[in-house]
Amino acid sequence: MNLKLFRVGQVGLAVWGSVLCWSGQVLAQDDTLLTDARKVAGAVPPKLLEVLNTQIAKDGLASAVTVCNEKAPQMAKTASEQTGWKIRRVSLRNRNPKAVPDAWEQSALEDFDQRTAAGEKPVTLEKFGVVEANGVKEYRYMKALPVIEVCTACHGAAEKISPEVAERLRTLYPADKATGYAVGQIRGAITIRKTL
Ligand code: HEC
């Protein structure tokens, strides 16, 4: 009787042990993915800002609109090819008609807005995790993109946007929703994903 109980206990312990071990491995893998995701998502916006600032200094703001229009999607594509992560930008008030968030991204963006309004620092806002949909498991990561002064020339209130920039935006993005932002608000997010 005692022996039987002991055996059952042993099996139980072994199963429990392997569950612990297994979840430990998953956690370690998630840790690596998070580190990589932070690196990848953190690298693209500064590069884009550098290109933007260089172009503004060289040929003025209106010319930089064209650079954003062509270079931003192109840089995301190159970074995707280089890193193996699918990379794009999304916003609750998108300019590019394709920059519409899906349900997971939308709830993150709403959460980022609420947390910013509650006083959290916008640069620290992120969301990540393993997401399974239609039998596909992915690791997803998103990082908020806060508005700084330079952004308001193309995303700010009407008085911040020059007639030339407004004109170019109207031509390229007739359904533009991405103006009226103030410094410190969340303009959108960089969102990256990788199939596991
Ligand atoms: C010179 C004008 C200009 C400036 C300055 C500018 N943007 Fe944009 N932004 C654009 C254009 C044009 C697009 C659309 C790009 C595209 O077609 O993918 C865009 C798109 C975006 C998007 C993608 C989502 C969407 O709405 O399409 C984000 C996020 C974004 N900008 C954030 C910023 C932030 C943050 C700054 C400041 C650091 C900034 N932008 C500065 C012109 C600008």
Image: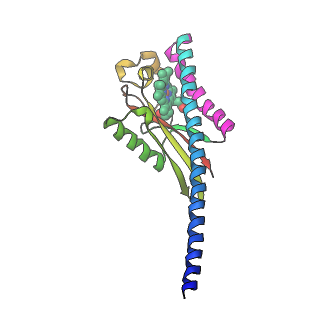
Q: Which residues are magenta?
A: 58-84
Residue at the top extreme, as displayed: 58
Residue 143 versus residue 21 in the image, above or below: above
Residue at the image position 60 percent from the left and 70 percent from the top? 14
Instruction: Let me know if residue 24 is in the magenta part.
Output: no
- State the image quarter where residue 153 is shown: top left
Residue 149 screen position, x and y as percent: 41, 20
* Side of 78 where 20 appears, left or right: left
Residue 124 percent coordinates (x, y): 44, 35
Position of 12 with respect to 185 (left or right) is right
The answer to whether residue 52 is visible is yes
Q: Is 74 within the magenta?
A: yes
For the point 58% across and 75% down, the residue is 10
Q: Residue at x 34, y 41 (%)?
A: 114
Could you say where residue 184 lies in the image, as x and y percent from the top left? 37, 28
User: Which residue is outermost to the front?
Assistant: 2
Magenta segment main secondary structure: helix
